[in-house]
Amino acid sequence: MQRINSVCGFFLAAVIHFSCAQPAFSQTPHTRPNVLMITVDDLNDWVGCLGGHPQSKTPNIDALIQHGILFTNAHCQAPICNPSRVSFMTGVRPSNSGIYVNGDRFRASKRLKNAITIPQQFAANGYVSMGCGKLFHASGGRSNFQTYGPFGGQGPLPDTRLNCPPEQSSSKLWDWGTFPEKEEDYHDVINSKWASAQLNKRHGKPFFLGVGFYRPHVPFYAPKRFFDLHPLEQVRLPKVLPNDMEDVPKYGRNLTNNTLPPDHAWFVESGKWQQAIQSYLSAVSFTDANIGRVIQALDEGPHADNTWIVLFSDHGFFLGEKARWAKQSLWERATKVPLIIVPPRSTATDWAKDQTCSSPVELLSLYPTLMELCDLPSPEGLDGTSLVPLLKQPNAEWNHPAITTYTKGSHSIRTTRWRYTRYADGSEEVYDLRNDPNEWHNQASRKEVSQVIANLKQWIPEHDEPPSGK
């Protein structure tokens, strides 16, 4: 098998989907394509193909776009794990389900009590549904799959934190460095090997395989060889504007005030900021290597010609921008995610490849997209819009903004150029992303953008479902 030249020999890498056979449509259950869905936790746009950080090294993720479409303006529907994952797995917006925070149980939602999730819909239509790793939040959702491999999660933790003193965070997850010592003990490695084994088997039916990678979620742990790719003294810090929060409404400041991570001032004053960035970049490179293992297994196995690949993150992550850490906000760093879709080799000539799409798209659209790609019916009540037109023509007309919700009544609308946020108390933020990509200058009070606000307001959800029971 031909391989990409990896950086320092550290990465598995794959060249995929290069044959040009004729596509088959009007599929029967025996000819319908398989789906490999790879989700990554807390991965922002710090991947090579998106350029979010100039020192990111992700050759396996980058290689995927040579054979598919990279969506450069993709956004989650909630900037926190549980509501984001529930939304894309059920196809229902948080404002319609009432799933807003990690503690909400999605089957307690009136709208989702009997909702059919993506793996359930595949299974109901003759597919084998398999999963491993973190797909739903925590350990929840495994019963939605016919077969579930290892779950994983953060993996083993050291008895004493490596770099973050307990007084800086009450959570043991806020830490970074190398742990455990053996690479095979990392849960993401275990999951990638289990998924690879499934891709090497013949299943008798088409399959849906979900693979959830935990890193770069905290703790930012990764094997030492990935730290060697990112020498500490060379690591660049994100740009931060002093007093950036002065033009943010009080409601927005309070909503995004997350006391669980260490305070940003501590990162700066202790000299740990650069170290934490190095660890995040290393964890991203580590996850890229695990993704490479899975893609290589697909390419060398019996299913390469007939499998769609979908790779994305559940939400973004702050690493000091706006003097904050983690996610839980309605700014670009928390909502923007990588999204790559690659067609099967047997149908490659019918789809765009090695292209980017800059239209604003939602993870919510994955459900109807996968149903259309596999010639399956969609359940009633899906809120998303299929991305199939953009997979055929990335520059096709697209009149759907990306909408992100964080807690009841607070929403953000992202178009190609603008971000408009309205909080539950009616306060607003408006950013011109073309000229202000860091969202440093809130223009909500400027008369010059009043028409922009009026146009974007129309996309604010009309209904805000009360939070679902815990």
Image: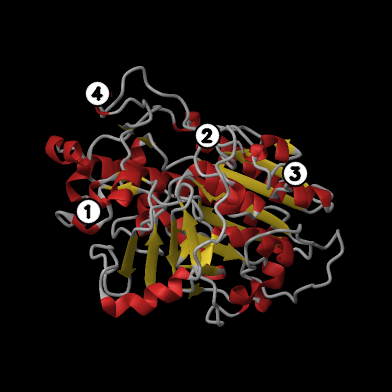
Cα–Cα span, label 2 and label 1:
28 Å
Cα–Cα span, label 3 and label 4:
43 Å
Q: Quadrant of the C terminus?
A: top right
Q: Quadrant of the N terminus?
A: bottom right
112 left or right of 69? right
- Mark 4 or mark 1, which is nearer to you? 1
Residue at 67 percent of width and 36 percent of height: 142
Q: Check disc 3 and give the amino acid type.
A: Asn
| Residue bearing the label numbered 2 | 103
Looking at the rendered structure, the secondary structure element under dot 1 is helix
Indicate the position of residue 94 as horizontal and vertical percent values.
56, 51
Numbered mark located on residue 167 in the image: 4
101 left or right of 346? left
Q: Earlier in the sequence, mark 4 or mark 2?
A: 2
Q: Is residue 416 visible?
A: no
Q: Is residue 180 visible?
A: yes
Indicate the position of residue 288 as horizontal and vertical percent values.
46, 50
